Image (cartoon, coloured by chain):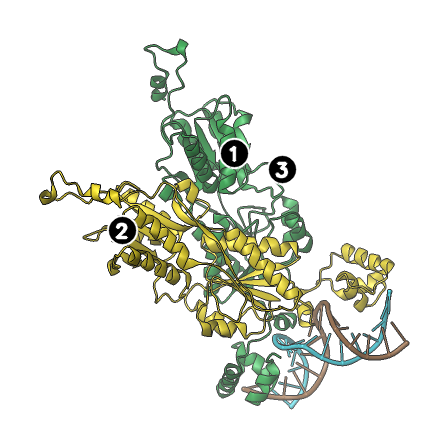
Chain colours: A green, B yellow, C cyan, D brown
Amino acid sequence: VSVTIEDVARRAEVSVATVSRALRQLPNVAPATRARVLAAAYELDYVADPHASRLAGARTTTIGLAVPTLGTWYHATLFAAVERVAAEAGYEVRPYTMSGPGGLERFLLDLPFRKGVDGLVLADAPNGPDELERVAVAGVPLLTLGVWTPSVPSLRIDDVASSRAAVDHLTDLGHRRIAFLGASDDDPMRFEAPIHRRRGYLDALRTVGVAADPRLVVAAGSSIADGAAAATRLFDLPAPPTAIFATTDELAFGVLQAARERRIEVPAQLSVVGFDDHAAAAAMGLTTVRQDVEALGARAAERLLALLAAPPAGVEHEIHPTELIVRRTSARVPPPPTRPAARGPSRPSDRKRLQ
Amino acid sequence: VSVTIEDVARRAEVSVATVSRALRQLPNVAPATRARVLAAAYELDYVADPHASRLAGARTTTIGLAVPTLGTWYHATLFAAVERVAAEAGYEVRPYTMSGPGGLERFLLDLPFRKGVDGLVLADAPNGPDELERVAVAGVPLLTLGVWTPSVPSLRIDDVASSRAAVDHLTDLGHRRIAFLGASDDDPMRFEAPIHRRRGYLDALRTVGVAADPRLVVAAGSSIADGAAAATRLFDLPAPPTAIFATTDELAFGVLQAARERRIEVPAQLSVVGFDDHAAAAAMGLTTVRQDVEALGARAAERLLALLAAPPAGVEHEIHPTELIVRRTSARVPPPPTRPAARGPSRPSDRKRLQ
DNA sequence: CTGAAAGCGCTTACAG
DNA sequence: CTGAAAGCGCTTACAG
């Protein structure tokens, strides 16, 4: 039904071995022969069957990108970036997602990428030394992004410091009741980033002598709707936060939406800071921690490709910079609601302003 | 280096044929034998080499999703939806993107999905009968989404009517200088949707007796930044529009951002309507045409899977509904700037209000 | 229910 | 520079 290398060989009047060589730009093919083969292949509309090719021992010229999901702005953007540089090098990129029930387990059990790709960039999941080790041992050249283990080349940002900067910004503005929105510890995906970002959050609070209020540390998912739901719960607290730090911009968008629905003014009554600098963050005026996802993805692809081309000299770990972008969703803490007893010339808001 | 079916056969003390059958849940395997094989495979951490498997004639249990890019919210969401239902059926989904220089041509030339997938859903590109025909002829079961040709089963929304509704909304509000942001005709990707949406736009204008002003029909790309750039050009026109209809929410976000930078009040001075109901649209308060991308993707996967399971009885074309969601970015047209000569008791804005 | 063998379409030593 | 042949790891008739 389909045209094979034999058809091409017959038409070009050479052996299949020669066709194989000619088509893959190997040396050792006379120019005239090569031309004849190329012409025949073109006329027949031939492309090598990738399965046969790979089974016979050739490279796949595809790299894998393992991500929790592709439904998130961060990961979709990552994919696009990886694919862009891979394409320039003649590689395809094949995503492996781990979302869905049992997705992570199945990924770890089957390691579906082995035999399917020449190399793999593993982004954000799975994490934990054991799981990473299992992947590393599968025998395909590996680079991790976000997660990290000493023996595997990696790329990441400093999540702790970045989120610390975000929360420092909030405490500088006088906020003390600051909520944290991130993935929970028992999330099946167990992302590492949210954990580190929470650490940064706690560090920042500690610096100003505030003990974290567990009710303000809430587990959200990753979608905008998740952010809205979490924010709504926060608003219903007896003592709601004056600021919310969300570990992704998408969660922050949800917070903004929920605030609007509740007629809570941002930033007058509530400050919100996100993380990512999502393409829509500027349009929303969101204060956020910028990470250059495009650059991260491109660099990951570059390094993996380099790894494939040459034996790795050693294990390198790269840390990319981030930057706090202050826009219009963060402002000084509002004066606390004046209770009858507190009325008087000594306004609490003045005190705050001194800090 | 890697464990093969032979290793499993040896350990289970059966032939490789039996291993193959047992592992693929075929009948004709004694329960006890099957158990032994499963145990051996488990202990050896065996998974069949997909390439060998496919080469030997088995199905790939993967379906393809061909999209212009995965960098767009619409397509990323589509992918996630397709993957969710595919996973439930035990299928993987493999994306084929056509973005980048020469991407479309290469796709059409190589048809890289053939031999790689059991079926393909083709979303939005390529379009045009000839190109679609070339893909259809490759021999893999096909379903198109967005684009459409009589001989291939398809799924889509009514782009003309949907965008007409959006622009009708604007004309109902008294707008007459309404700009259109979409892909250009000579876009290498030649999406069909923008063309249909422009038709709807023109129809709506014609209904109120307005001739389209070519300067208000602008070719934008697909990103938020593209939308901002296009909007800025529009703002610089001698007679800028009072409303902008963008063919995607992402473009609309860019418009909103550009408006903010120019201190143009939305909706007081400018109305904007998008298309998609992007996850962030609610958070932005964007008036838009909602299409249920999640449902579209899920349905596409379902139908393709059904096609694979049973010989298609006939070619079905499905049209999914859309809905105009009016939020806070659209309002009555502002009164035209009062020129000195026009001052007086007869305010033009009153006239508008009657319409 | 199970096995021996052919074959899927390539690539890669090995000769020449 | 080119070809004949083995082999990659499976699946599928074909026998039994």
**Is circle 1 on the same chain as circle 3?**
yes
Residue B181 relative to residue B99: left or right: left
Residue at figure coordinates x 45%, y 41% from the top left: A249
Q: Can residue A353 be seen in the rendering of this structure?
A: yes
Q: Which mark is residue A269?
A: none
Residue B45 relative to residue B147: left or right: right
Please report, as a chain letter, where disc 2 is located.
B
Inspect the image, locate mark 3, and give the three-letter code of the amino acid beneath it: Asp
Q: Quadrant of residue C8?
A: bottom right
Q: In front here: B93 or A60?
A: B93
According to the picture, the residue beneath numbered tag 3 turns out to be A186
Q: Quadrant of residue B141?
A: bottom right
Residue at figure coordinates x 54%, y 66% from the top left: B153
Q: Give how far apart the Cα atoms at labels 3 and 2 are.
A: 46 Å
According to the picture, the residue beneath numbered tag 2 turns out to be B232
Please report, as a chain letter, where disc 3 is located.
A
According to the picture, the residue beneath numbered tag 1 turns out to be A230
**Mark 3 secondary-structure assignment:** loop
Figure check: A99 above or below A221: below
Residue at figure coordinates x 57%, y 90% from the top left: A13
**Mark 2 secondary-structure assignment:** helix
**Mark 1 secondary-structure assignment:** helix
Q: Give how far apart the Cα atoms at labels 1 and 3 are.
A: 17 Å
